Amino acid sequence: MSAGQRGALGWRASWRIARRDLHAGFRGLRLLLVCLFLGVATLATIGSLTASITAELSSRGRVLLGGDVEVAMTQRQASAAEYAALAQLGAVSDTIRTRAMARRAAPAPGAPDAVLTELKGVDTRYPLYGSLMLAAGRYAPLTADAALIGRPLAERLLLNPGDRIRYGEAEFRVAGIIADEPDRVGEGFTLGPVAIVSLAGLARTGLLQPGALYETKYRIRLSPGITPQEATDRLKARFPAAGWEYKDRDRAAPGAVRFFERMGQFLSLIGLAALVIAGIGVSNGVASYLAQKRGSIATLKILGATSGDISRIYLLQIGAATALAVAAGLLVGALLPVAFVNLARDLLPVAPGMGVYPLPLATSAAYGVLIALAFALPPLARARTHPAAAQLRSGVEGARIDRRSVGLVVVAGALVVALALATAREPLFAAAVLGAVAAVLLVLLGIGALVRRLAARVPRPRRPLLRLAIANLHRPGAQTVALVIALGLALTLFVTLAAIQTSLDAEISRAVPERAPSQFVLDIPAESRERFAAVVKREAPEAKLNIVPSLRGTITAYGKQRVADLATLPEGAWFLRGERGVTYADTLPQGSELTAGQWWPKNYDGPPLVSLDRDAARILDLRVGDTLTVSILGREIEARIASLRQVNWDTMGFNYVLVFSPNTLAGAPHSLTSTVDIDPGHEGAVSRALLAAFPSASIIAVSEVLGQVRTILDQMATAILLSASVAILAGIAVLIGAIAAARQARTYDSVILKTLGATRRQILAAQALEYALLALMLAALALALGTLAAWYVITGVFEFRWAPDWVAILATLGAGALLTLGIGLLGSLPVLSVRPAQALRRL
């Protein structure tokens, strides 16, 4: 090729050369394929699953909500004027929901005395949308003596259709077993199985006493021409102080949507971190591949190919492998959620249908391409800038990356960060996670460089194997930095997962039961405080009781700001979302510490005062002396903040954001709630005595609550484990890539050592010592970084107490070190099988 023809290769000619040189099985680029496939498949799976669930929740809004608009209130029903205003908007369906104890009318061997349930009374229009499905037969409006029960309740009380069940003062015939309750997700979190009766049947129970804790929901099927927003605006304007909670068909299950979106974002960030880690494997894989192609690159340059031609040829090969890996990852990411939905159908709030969700797939593909570009460019730049003579010599150190490559890498990295922040629900949280990952990688990069420099300066040991192991850490072409990153990441992830799992187990198994009462008792008549205490003490004299008044209220304004006028709620202001429990007290409640202001004197009879949780005051920027407006039983009460409290939420007692002075609420209809701390052997006797004395009371066993909490946390921990496992696999791929990148240099060393008389066992022992030295040096760092990451997840994400099992963590760290050491040695075995004569002929 003449000088005038230099640089004449275009993209088409470059592709012909690239295609001829590219092995059909992508030999040499398989590590790139594996790394990108793992990362893209993880991101696509998480994104598709999150999108499918949230899309299903949105598309079935009318059915999940039970109407176009829902108006909810607690401890009361709508007045005649309020109901008339609702009816003007369209057809109205009335439901009342409360917690109540279900009992068999006739005892049965093996059945418990009573089971806490969610009892729902419905009118004849229920459901406005969707269908209430029964296990046998069709649903028809219920008579006053009929009840439908969920299968879990039927199994626990050993009930069949035709049997009789008791609620409060009324007895019901089981008319059927519920197969599908259309508005189940829209009802929110429940503590027990469901049962449905008519409104007339609910009235027969005597459960709806003044002050009882129940929730009334009015679902409206809007008349043509009225939009949900218009209907809500009309009601808010007409009843501004009602304290109602509104939902519409576009946000039928906001809690479920919020949970899945946030969990999806958290897992996606873990997946993105795994893809970034895999990018190091991509870099090692490309470096190893280009090292194998040095002869071809040198030949092309001798024949006149320019640096640009070399870039195009091998960029096309890497691009083909990237396209295949990304496509395979997207295919798995689109199909795997379908399999997951079929396996975990009972664990999901809705069963998403089959579908392809372009946005998460496109986002995952963009991440994969950008990561491949960012990590493939540096080794490609070294191949492009090395002269032909240098390419023909083995073991050459890499040259500096040219400015163009550095610029492209920076642009690709910036695009990854920008994409992550643009698609994040909480950009600050996403930025913190990405920053933490970048910081860990930089720390490991610095440690790798430091280890290499120190290894070159330490005195040479007398033992040959140890001297050889240390020399391998700083020799030309050594992959020490990549090995440090791979081993450090893998060990750090092992420690993180072990610390998270053991701390969660400790929180649920040990810490919570030590603090928690045995039972919660709800809906105790306000005038029966002394009688209630007497019943409990008769059955369990050692019982400890904490009895408090209980009401429900909605914060409608703070300072001069109306909550309804806020475009978005302040970050962390969960207590502004709907109704919350409120109480009143003469003295500072148990589990609280006064941090500012003063408690009101006993028998205070002045203007309304309230004590506010300190964290809530900080979020709302409120201080002692400011005002707070709360709607209770449809009446707005403006109170001055008299004090701030530190609430110890982890005591599992009665912890209220708002505590009022007694003169503010003592005259309002309300009931009492109580915690009962007794010996487990007395729980059954106390429950039976309380239900006999107070048929309308509900008893919540703390063990059942903890069981549900454990199930939820186990599911979340499993999701984190699965996502983090991809990061571990990526770290292992990085380790394999580092070994592959150094294979030619290690092959040369192995051949020389064999020629000089070294055995395979001695060569393998030297490499084992090398990996062992790195693992020992990185163990302390991995322990520190892993525990720091786990501490943040436990205290920041789960908001639990930090209580890891250090023995288990150290054992996991040791096992992880042995695993990575074994993988490193397995990756070195092909080097030992090379025959000296064959290797020397290739040099």
Image (tube, rainbow, N blue to C red):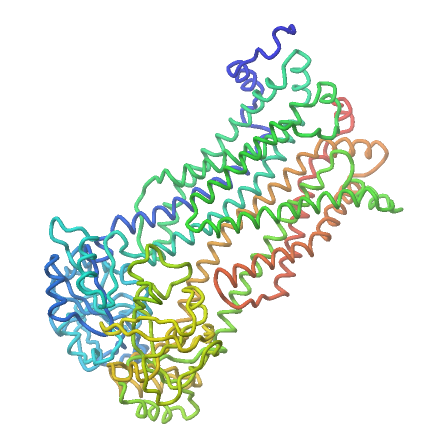
- Front-most of residues 455 and 181: 455
* Residue 554 placement: quadrant: bottom left
Left or right of residue 742: residue 347 = left
Q: Is residue 35 above or below residue 600?
A: above
**Image coords of residue 271 (percent x, y):** 50, 46
* Nearer-the-camera pick, 446 or 137: 446
Q: Nearer the viewer, residue 425 or 237?
A: 237
Quadrant for the C terminus, please.
Answer: top right
Q: Position of residue 283 (x, y in %)?
A: 61, 35
Q: Is residue 161 visible?
A: no
Answer left or right for 626 relative to 741.
left
Q: Is residue 549 above or below residue 326?
A: below
Judge from the rendering whether residue 377 lies leftward or rightward of residue 48; answer left or right.
Answer: right
* One can see residue 427 in this view: yes
Label count reads: 0
Name the foreground residue: 136 vs 572. Answer: 572
Q: Residue furthest right?
A: 462
Percent coordinates x, y for residue 602 in the rendering: 38, 89
Where is residue 752? Give x, y as percent.
82, 31
- In what quadrant of the picture does the N terminus appear? top right
